[in-house]
Amino acid sequence: NKRLLSKLHPKTNDIVLLNKSYLKDEYSNVTQKVSGFLGRNIFLQPSHPLSLVRQRIVNHFYKSFVTRRGNPVFSVHDNLQPIVNTTQNFDSLLIPENHPSRSKSDCYYINKNYLLRAHMTAHQSELIQSGLNNFLIIGDVYRRDEIDRTHYPVFHQVDAVRLLSREQLFSKDDNLNIFEEGNNTAFTGNQEKQACHSLEAVKLIEYELKQTLHGLAKELFGDHVKYRWVDTTFPFTQPSWELEIYHVSEWIEVLGCGIMQQAILNNAGVNNKIGWAFGLGLERLAMCLYKIPDIRLFWSNDSGFLNQFKSKNPNDSITYIPISQYPQCKNDLSFWIPTTGHFSSNDFYDLARNIAGDLIEQIQLIDEFTHPKNGKISHCYRITYRHMEKTLTQDEVNMIHKKIEESVKEMGGTIR
Ligand code: FA5
Ligand code: MG
């Protein structure tokens, strides 16, 4: 992988991203393909489907929370740089040192200290520190992940934070508090609350959080939207939930949320408020809302796609009519994985994406075995090729497939 990277950025030990130069080290794994997404800002392009959903969500928050004078309470932050340090992405959110989400096989690292943000939550702590109480954070996030119709190395998230004081939570003459000394981690539903919080405060803000998000789901999918709350865990919230929406005969996870760990607020200099937070995926919502079948389409410059959203308003009802689907072409590739270094399937996904880009619809690891004598490990991947805008010829596919083979060899793999 190192060899692959030095080939992509020859001669120098620097990598330049968004006009800044970074020193590479053994962590660096940002590919050329992925760095090409930086600064594209498709979620801000007028009448791009991601932009339409973004505006609808923002409008929902502007409408739902207003000051006595009728002004929106939430501020929107959608121009924060996607390059963050590990303190922002992990430490500030209490993500432990050995947590799997920090691993090189899951993140795009620029070097040991900097990475492409893996979630918008990376900015939460510093915005609280700057004195904000109600805000939305919107932007592009980057993860090394599988390759199929719902996963892409870059996608978009909307995060939100709302902090509430005792006075906002309870009526003046109530004798209730947000905090208590005790070590009461009583069950709230089937999850424990944080010991420092009173059950009354937790229940009130859980109610507000769920009302707000159910309201958003109704706003997007109609009053009769079928939804459910699923208990989960995040290092930065407790208790935590996921919201799932029932869409075309399956439950789809659209967001994670919860009551913020009090230590995050305390570390940011706020010790008299309690907060809720959530993070949702724009692609998931847009795919459900407009019936967009493949996540690659969001990056398409094809007029057959973009024109269907052109000069539409956020509240228009739009159903995407698929441009005719061109045939798939499947090719398998088996190789002995490199014996040096840590090889993960995500390394192969990145390598293939880097060469074939959006011509790949899906890659599946279909077989894996260890040689009984020499202990070498073999992987077999099935690559599904499909162009979004034309029919691929077998020759074209063979050429690309060959290049992927070459690249596997350069990485230290042995084609079988
Ligand atoms: C997070 O990223 C948390 N930061 C969310 C959060 C924020 C929780 C604040 C609590 C408080 P998660 O990895 O589950 O969680 O991603 C959140 C949402 O992003 C998912 O529900 C999904 O809608 C979307 N998402 C996640 N991975 C992908 C992917 N590979 N492709 C498209 N959308 C994705
Ligand atoms: Mg999740």
Image: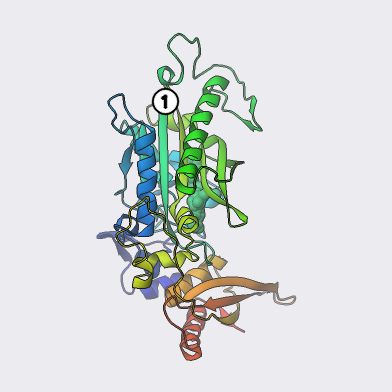
Q: Position of residue 350 (x, y in %)?
A: 47, 69
User: Residue 121 is drawn in which quadrant?
Assistant: top left
Residue type pointed to by label 1 = Leu
Q: Nearer the viewer, residue 377 or 59?
A: 59
The answer to whether 48 is drawn above or below residue 382 in the figure is: above
Q: Nearer the viewer, residue 291 or 373?
A: 291
Q: Is residue 304 visible?
A: yes
Q: Is residue 135 visible?
A: no
For the point 55% across and 25% down, the residue is 203
Q: Position of residue 414 (x, y in %)?
A: 58, 81
For the point 35% across and 53% down, the residue is 83
Q: Nearer the viewer, residue 282 or 100?
A: 282
Q: Position of residue 298 (x, y in %)?
A: 40, 64
Crowd rating for badge 1 (residues with CA inside 10 Å; few <14, some 14–19, many 20+): some
The answer to whether 132 is drawn above or below residue 39 in the figure is: above
Residue assigned mark 1: 164
Q: Is residue 175 left or right of residue 299?
A: right
Q: Position of residue 27 (x, y in %)?
A: 44, 60
Give the SS element for disc 1: strand
Number of marks present in the image shown:
1
Mark 1, ligand 1, within 8 Å: the answer is no
